[in-house]
Image: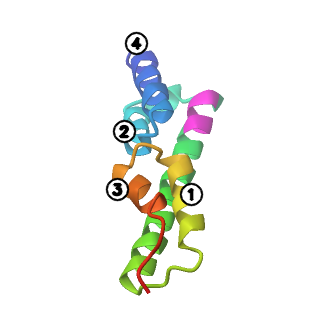
Amino acid sequence: QVRDESYVEAQKAFAAQDYVSCLASLNKIDPSLVDAAILGLKNQAREISEEVQRLNWHISQALEMKQYDGLLEFVDQYLALQSGDHERQQLRFRSTFPR
């Protein structure tokens, strides 16, 4: 019961691009009940969560150092994984960056 409920919660969180909640739901599942589908979702959510953090770091660093060349590539990659991030959406649709 807990396994199935947690897995459904995790799938919903993953679909909503909430990878941290996805992992939290999957971590509620007793390790003895983990199957290939659960493990696959957990690995995928972990990898994407790490990539989101990496991209966010690059974006923040570029903005802080005013290094705008290549910034939109990072923003586009980030938004592909976190499409609901309004702050990054605004950054994406900014037509020019200060020099």
Residue position marked by numbered label 3 in the rendering: 87
Disc 4 or disc 2, which is closer to the eye? Answer: 2
Of callouts 4 and 2, the N-terminal one: 4
Q: Position of residue 94 (x, y in %)?
A: 44, 63
Mark 4 is on which residue type? Gln
Please give the name of the residue rendered at 36% of the width and 49% of the height, measured from the top-left corner.
86
Residue position marked by numbered label 4 in the rendering: 1
Residue 34 left/right relative to 8: right
Please give the name of the residue rendered at 48% of the width and 84% of the height, measured from the top-left corner.
67
| Residue farthest toward the front in the current orientation of the protein | 95
Give the structural element (helix, strand or loop) at label 1: helix
Please give the name of the residue rendered at 41% of the width and 43% of the height, measured from the top-left corner.
84
- Cα separation between marks 2 and 3: 20 Å
Disc 1 or disc 2, which is closer to the eye? Answer: 1
Mark 1 is on which residue type? Asp
Disc 3 residue crowd, few under 14, some 14–19, many 20+, Cα 10 Å: few
Give the structural element (helix, strand or loop) at label 2: helix
Q: Nearer the viewer, residue 32 or 91?
A: 91
Question: Can you tell which mark lies on residue 21?
Answer: 2
Disc 2 residue crowd, few under 14, some 14–19, many 20+, Cα 10 Å: some
